[in-house]
Image (cartoon, rainbow, N blue to C red):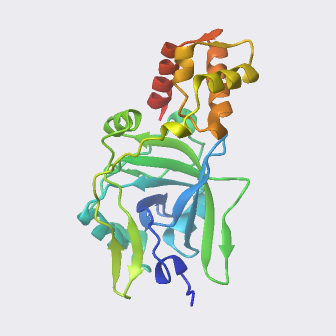
Amino acid sequence: TILNNFYQTSSFFPMPVVLVSTVAESGQTNLGPYSLCFPLKIAGDGRRAMVLVSRADSNTAENIRRTGVCAINFIPDKKKYMKNCVELGFPGETTEEKMENSIFTLIPSQRTEEERKPETKYPEIVDESFQVFECSVDPAEPPIVDEEVGECRMVLLVDKIVMKKKWKKALFKGKGFPRVPIDFGFRNNANFWFSKHSKPYKVPIPESKAVDISSVRYAVERCDPEIEWTDEACEKIVKVPRVFMTTVIRGVNEKAKEKGIEKITADFMDEVRDKRSREK
């Protein structure tokens, strides 16, 4: 039998643990812990978005529907943080009541003046987070409230990603990752269950899955014959899956044209990669 809340009552489903910060009617920042929060739109300008599923009458859902903004705070895996998340998630409390029990440090939104809308108050973010997505409701897909089950589904555009230097460096180097919590949900009518974090490990892409330089060069010439790539530059993307190859090449070519460059070198590829890392 498949029960309601099937992902935790009728199956094992690993989920993230995030704190969604919103602005209450009083102007105070509200923190709500969530696990049903996942990437929804992953590519294209203005199309990077998360989906958040919440009780329709939760503080978080009501605040997002009223203000149109929120922040998704990714906190590291510490037992005291998970314990406080369970406390903050207890339904029925006002923002003032629940925030008295918060152990998290709040700091101002990191949006610049140019990134802010007039008359909009943005929620504070959690300083302990290893990364924060500052979001706004997708105007093309307003929140959907299912009155029958009391559920609200929200599409949230990722306007800005805030990440501390330590984790930016780890993301760029591909090692030294943060301790990311995993939630298995509410069980036994008494407890929330979380996995014990262990050190991440890597699995190299098999050589048989990588393309050779000739395949990259063929793709390069088909994309834009006016832009030349050196063999060393082509080698930089031999492990990019074929389905993404054209997108990567076009992106690099656009960067080259912006700078008036007609020949892509390995150094330019490194420059593009470094710039992308700094922008995260």
Q: Nearer the viewer, residue 12 or 27?
A: 12
Residue placed at 56% from the left, 68% from the top?
53
Q: Is residue 115 above or below residue 63?
A: above
Residue 240 occupies quadrant: top right
Give the vertical position of 242 relative to 36 (above or below). Answer: above
Q: Nearer the viewer, residue 121 or 15?
A: 15
Residue 43 in the image: x percent, y percent? 64, 43
Residue lying at 44% horizontally and 48% vertically, measured from the top left = 132
Q: Pinpoint residue 233: horizontal percent, then vertical percent.
A: 54, 18
Q: Quadrant of the N terminus?
A: bottom right
- Horizontal arrangement in the rendering, residue 182 relative to residue 206 (left or right): left
State the residue in front, 5 or 73.
5
Query: Where does the image place residue 178, in percent across and percent down from the top left?
Result: 32, 48
Residue 6 in view of the camera: yes
From where the camera sits, is residue 101 visible?
Answer: no
Which residue is located at x 71 percent, y 58 percent? 141
Question: Which residue sits furthest left?
Answer: 80
All told, the count of numbered labels is: 0
Residue 178 versus residue 58: which sits nearer the camera? Answer: 178
Please, which residue is most extreme toward the front here? 208
Residue 39 vertical position relative to residue 257 in the rendered view, above or below: below
At horizontal 62% and vertical 67% (from top left) the residue drawn is 153
Give coordinates of residue 91: x percent, y percent.
43, 79
Residue 253, image quadrant: top right
**Residue farthest toward the bottom in the current orientation of the protein:** 1
